[in-house]
Image (cartoon, coloured by chain):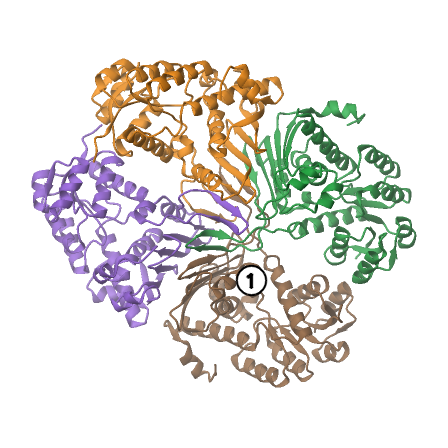
Chain colours: A green, B orange, C purple, D brown
Amino acid sequence: MSTPVKIAVVGAGRIGSLHTELLSARVKGAEVVAVADVVSKAAESLAARFEIPVVCSTVDEAIDRGKPDALLVCSSTDTHEEAIEKAAAHGVHVFCEKPLSDTIESIERIRTAVERSAILLQVGFNRRFDASFARVRQAIAGGEIGELHTVRITSRDPEPPPIEYVRRSGGLFMDMTIHDFDMVRFLCGAEPTEMYAIGACRVDPAIGEAGDIDTALVTLRFADGTFATIENSRQAVYGYDQRAEAFGSAGAVSTDNVYPNTATLSNAGGVGRDLPLRFFLERYTESYVNELSGFIGAVRDGGQSSVDVIDGREAVFLAQAAERSRTGGTPVVLDDYRDELGLSG
Amino acid sequence: MSTPVKIAVVGAGRIGSLHTELLSARVKGAEVVAVADVVSKAAESLAARFEIPVVCSTVDEAIDRGKPDALLVCSSTDTHEEAIEKAAAHGVHVFCEKPLSDTIESIERIRTAVERSAILLQVGFNRRFDASFARVRQAIAGGEIGELHTVRITSRDPEPPPIEYVRRSGGLFMDMTIHDFDMVRFLCGAEPTEMYAIGACRVDPAIGEAGDIDTALVTLRFADGTFATIENSRQAVYGYDQRAEAFGSAGAVSTDNVYPNTATLSNAGGVGRDLPLRFFLERYTESYVNELSGFIGAVRDGGQSSVDVIDGREAVFLAQAAERSRTGGTPVVLDDYRDELGLSG
Amino acid sequence: MSTPVKIAVVGAGRIGSLHTELLSARVKGAEVVAVADVVSKAAESLAARFEIPVVCSTVDEAIDRGKPDALLVCSSTDTHEEAIEKAAAHGVHVFCEKPLSDTIESIERIRTAVERSAILLQVGFNRRFDASFARVRQAIAGGEIGELHTVRITSRDPEPPPIEYVRRSGGLFMDMTIHDFDMVRFLCGAEPTEMYAIGACRVDPAIGEAGDIDTALVTLRFADGTFATIENSRQAVYGYDQRAEAFGSAGAVSTDNVYPNTATLSNAGGVGRDLPLRFFLERYTESYVNELSGFIGAVRDGGQSSVDVIDGREAVFLAQAAERSRTGGTPVVLDDYRDELGLSG
Amino acid sequence: MSTPVKIAVVGAGRIGSLHTELLSARVKGAEVVAVADVVSKAAESLAARFEIPVVCSTVDEAIDRGKPDALLVCSSTDTHEEAIEKAAAHGVHVFCEKPLSDTIESIERIRTAVERSAILLQVGFNRRFDASFARVRQAIAGGEIGELHTVRITSRDPEPPPIEYVRRSGGLFMDMTIHDFDMVRFLCGAEPTEMYAIGACRVDPAIGEAGDIDTALVTLRFADGTFATIENSRQAVYGYDQRAEAFGSAGAVSTDNVYPNTATLSNAGGVGRDLPLRFFLERYTESYVNELSGFIGAVRDGGQSSVDVIDGREAVFLAQAAERSRTGGTPVVLDDYRDELGLSG
């Protein structure tokens, strides 16, 4: 076997720990050589669990001492730009959790850094790598449903995050719908041209008091006349509700939720089954394995990024546009808004 | 058993024939005593099939000679107003196919006539009486899914009507979505306050040339923050796609299409089943039986109409609003539009 | 349209009433001209409901006064032979409810009468005409699953009949499994060569005290090595459980139960749906319409019987063989048993 | 974290390699310290992949040099007895692949060795640890379906093994049905009292020429009147068909196959989905992780074996009884056969 790809993990929180575990146990050809976290206990504990040689508190140290081929950026969003720029400066590739950064301006700077250094950057839109969503994309791309007419994404969390989290989250569109904006682009293989977004606070008044919404409906229109809807809720009491449907001139494809077992129970009260998987780390485990495997492979073989800076930017752009449509109460023509922001295609 | 309710059928076309057959064979307590059609052959042929004593060409004759308790109006939409006014003038109850009339003004005149004469008028929104949609309404009304947050209606025909028909149809919203507008009101048990509608011609360019759309997406908002979407297409190649989902604070409910059998076939190519029912008369047969049974019962017992003039008007109003939103490219605030039309609640 | 086929119904009980209603309302080309029942009130009441001109108490009267083309024998099993012989003597065709008669000897006499008079006789194995079971047969006969290897029939009633009924029923195999024996022959298109049957009393001890079983498992073997199982219970608390699976060299086909609606409900407790249909008349309504339509068509056009005397006899023969296997505790070689009974193929 | 449980793997073939990978990557608290295989290349290659320090060719060496807490016996069946006896002699615990040994006599000797040394022995009936089958057991054990009446196991391979393998397999009952015999015992939580088995060669005549069958149907009866069936085939062209149903006084539970994704595709030809998982290592991966995790936990904590020597023996006993029933053509009373073999309960 070839030399493993050396990874430095930045950020030893929940998602950083998960990625570290998957890189150690499930992903072939990777080796975690350093872990950095400003909370030294977190870094130490993760290093101990997976026998990671370098434990440190900064990106610089992780790069200097770990000599990694790639950085896995799992720290808070406001630190992404700096981490990526340091990686780029050293020619170190980057896998970065979503959102790529807080603002379009920051992402544009990241883009410049990445393009200049020619490093590979992959954004952590893991749902693209889920077997069911990938199958929908395959059906669309492979012509199994003909010419695409409509796409529908259902995306509901099992329960809202703590209000503390809501306050710092950037809002529902930036925190939650961002995955669905990426999914729409992924499934359609095209950029939307117009968006209309409405929102409400139905789940918990405290979310409204924190200035956010917990229920949203986003309508998107594409140049060829394709329509898409995204339906979000912060709380589906029956579990994590993550589905997609696509309809076209030659058929349709739709996915279901994922269940812990296949058993159906019939008794005098009805015919039913256990609740779908509730926890996103469980629902999407295999998608994380797949996205990391793809990244490791691309780093090793010098391949293209499957989810690049533009993908990272567009999801943030759409989240901003949704907020604008919702607060303005009107549809947003996306190219106009793009011009306003000085963005090129 | 009590004396049967005597019915005069006006219009011996496809839907008039179906209703006559169901009244004869499946609905208890009804007797078709007269059939009127300007095409005398159609009236005669239907009368012969079901041994209907009075065959005539006008509503007047049908009422005079048949002495019906109720009129079943299945003639073309432009004749509805006159037929209903004649029935009202004679104190004859009315079951009228959708749409109730071509314009809001005409419906308001019908409303006056009906209220004055105190006859019972039921509009033919048969889908309310379909076991699956009725079960969704029951789940919402009975609190099984808690407080309602979102409703989603999928409504796709198996194939577009002839271009001739499209030209005279009043447009997709008035001809096809009208059923879904009624369904949204029925499921939610409330009136929407805002609407945003977009449309496209994706199925057949000839439909666009005829000035119509064949694909539509309508977003509705309700006073309590509930959202609804309606997704239409003139052509689902896999059959008649008629489904609803509702989501609320305590759960969700969704329906599937109806299949000709329950068989699942597995072979080396996949696991599948036969196509869902394709023909609306077959898919919705039981709903027609149910709506007619309800109407006959209400006439016999002096009950209330389950789908009244206001229901008939609101569906037409929403279809008009949808056209306005689509052509204007902006959301329509429904109360403002209502004011503009001089409509009271 | 051609002259309707004239039917005399013998036996105005539950199934006789159902058939009369279906012949009047749902089956094209039939006219019920006479109804006979030893309980004159039953006959009168049915005649009144469907405007049947001749009401009488005997088969002779029904034939003499009604001049029917066909007799619909829905009276108790012990009267079938006499009714059929009278019909045969007058050249009147017969539709006879299952079982054709109580004993093999009686059925052989019926067979002689039918063959001599060349009347058409159809036995009421309605399940063959159910869309889902018919689809399984179609898959097998059409080669969709290749060469047939195994068949599995699940047949469970929602609740046991009254003990009074159980006592006079002829036993589970003759009363209930008889439908499944016919189904096995229908699905396989072949005769079994060996049978092993076991039974138990699990549902209600009173059934055991009445000398019967309420739970059974029958294994059948065919000449080409195909295996079949039948699983029976007198009580499935979740409703009428009626399914079939077939497996072959190129695939498999299986059916599900029939539900009153397609709605799926998800809440904090699970994901489920309403119970399947419970009442056999509701579950199998369409199959009754289909079997009667087929019979009427065959009478009118001089066609062959789709379920003939041999079919009627073989189901009874298999029920007897099952009882023999169960009480003997060993497999029964069916040809040996056939020889013992002096039966020819 | 506590010291990991040290494991020596005996047999570096397909299943040995899988277990080694799972122990390294997915099972917490285990460490593979030695690998033994008579084919030194196989042992070396596996050791290299997972950095296993001791590589050897015999059980003795693996124990001497690896100082394991437990042996994972994945070598050919004829070597199980010797390996287990060596482990027992050293107080080393054992996880042994099924079947435990070739003959009842050998298993009885293993039983004596295990009982004498008080080591823990777990047999590799992994399907008990599959989430869906475990859910069926839970429903039965937890009373969710009331008193158990019938169990039905469908177990079909996607394709037959090579004829070479068939010849040395011990026959279908010993090689394949053995899993289902264990499953029946696991699901019912009781021992069957009578069995009737029939078999045929339908898939490939070469299997018949090799003296084996490829299609089987086994009927089991339990003391309380519960019935069970097992349906086997060496070839289901649509994939690995592994399902169970249980029926009782208060309801029923059934499982479905496992699919690679949840997507449903509808087009003009039908409504379908991709084939179920085909490869047993993929279908049952999680069950392997679960069974090994349970074993490691039991070794670490001094717990009981969840699948013990008696479980290992009974599956082999039932496989022998099935062969006896099939070749004899009659049901086998299992206690009589047990007496004949001199087996105690």
Q: Quadrant of the N terminus of chain D?
A: bottom right
Q: Nearer the viewer, residue A248 or C309?
A: A248
Task: Kindly tell me whether residue C122 is visible in this rendering.
Answer: no
Q: Is D119 rendered above or below residue B268? A: below
Q: Is residue B83 visible?
A: yes
Q: Nearer the viewer, residue D67 or A174?
A: A174
Residue A204 x/y as whole percent = 63, 42
- In this picture, is C233 found above or below B345? below
Q: Nearer the viewer, residue B208 or B232?
A: B232
The crowding category of the residue bearing disc 1, from other C-alpha atoms within 10 Å (few below 14, some 14 to 19, many at least 20), is few
Tell me where residue C146 appears, x and y as whole percent: 44, 50
| Chain designation of label 1 | D
Of residues D37 and D122, the one nearer the viewer is: D122
Q: Residue at x 72, y 80 (%)?
A: D60
- Residue at the spot x=76%, y=37% of the render? A312
Check disc 1 and report the residue beneath it.
D161
Image height of D144 relative to A8, above or below: below
Numbered disc 1: secondary structure: loop
Residue drawn at point x = 51 percent, y = 54 percent = D256
Please say if D309 is above or below C141: below
Residue C279: percent from the left, percent from the top?
32, 49
Instruction: Please name the amino acid that badge 1 sits on.
Output: Pro
Q: In the image, is B190 to the left or to the right of C337?
A: right
